[in-house]
Image (cartoon, grey):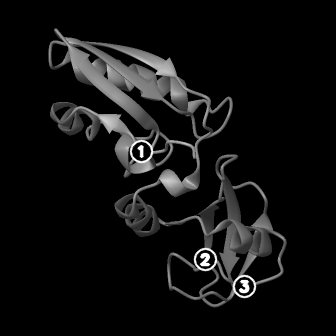
Amino acid sequence: MIETEAKIQSHLIPILETVSDPEIPVLSVLDLGVIREASEENGHVTIKLTPTYSGCPAMDVIGDDLRAAFQKEDMTAQIELILAPAWSTDWISEEGKRKMEAYGIAAPLGETADKAALLGNQKIVKCTNCGSTNTHLVSQFGSTACKALFKCDDCQEPFDYFKCLK
């Protein structure tokens, strides 16, 4: 079994909660589930970070933002990228999914439902504006590679859907 539970020293959590994903600023790095480990010893913090996508440009920004957040607390932070196990949308917290929806991005569906939605086989992606599932795929890629662009056929609003990754 692959270990997916993050190991974070509790006194570091309030600082980590201040660091947002630059592409979805309502989500903290904890909401997104990219922090695998965070430990501190004598003012030096070691953070193990798993990228959402290989080559995701947000990871450099997140690393810089983490170092800055800990520097404000008179600590230094070293960031280590962890590629295995690969990040999964299952690691997004339930609170993170709620924040994402409120921000206007449909949260990822399960793996089977995701494929059905992205192939146009089922109308199951819920519009973040009106809540209708009478939606359709406009593009496999939305504002970033990790999102698809959908449009609601009821309210006519476009919106991003965060694609499922397992």
Which residue is label 2 attached to?
157
**Mark 2: few, some, or many residues within 10 Å (few <14, many ≥20)?**
some
Circle 3: residue type? Lys
Instruction: Name which of mark 3 and mark 2 comes first in the sequence.
Output: 3
Is 51 or 158 nearer to us in this picture? Answer: 51
Q: Is residue 30 above or below residue 156?
A: above
Tell me how far mark 1 sits from mark 3, CA to CA: 33 Å
Instruction: Name which of mark 1 and mark 2 comes first in the sequence.
Output: 1
Q: Is residue 50 above or below residue 60?
A: below
Which residue is label 1 attached to?
5
Assess whether mark 2 and mark 3 are in contact (beta carbons under 8 angstroms): no
Instruction: Name which of mark 1 and mark 3 comes first in the sequence.
Output: 1
Which residue is label 3 attached to?
123
Residue 14 seen anywhere in this rendered image of the structure: yes
* Image side of residue 159 versus residue 123, left or right: left
Q: In terms of image quadrants, where is residue 64?
A: top left
SS type, badge 1:
loop
Is 112 or 142 nearer to us in this picture? Answer: 112
Q: Position of residue 116 (x, y in %)?
A: 78, 75
SS type, badge 2:
loop
Is 113 or 155 nearer to us in this picture? Answer: 113
- Residue at the (19%, 37%) spot, across then down: 10
Tell me how far mark 1 sits from mark 2, CA to CA: 37 Å
Circle 1: residue type? Glu
Q: Nearer the viewer, mark 1 or mark 3?
A: 1
- Residue at the (62%, 39%) spot, across then down: 86
Q: Nearer the viewer, mark 1 or mark 2?
A: 1
Q: Position of residue 12 (x, y in %)?
A: 21, 31
Q: In terms of image quadrants, where is residue 102?
A: bottom left
SS type, badge 3:
loop
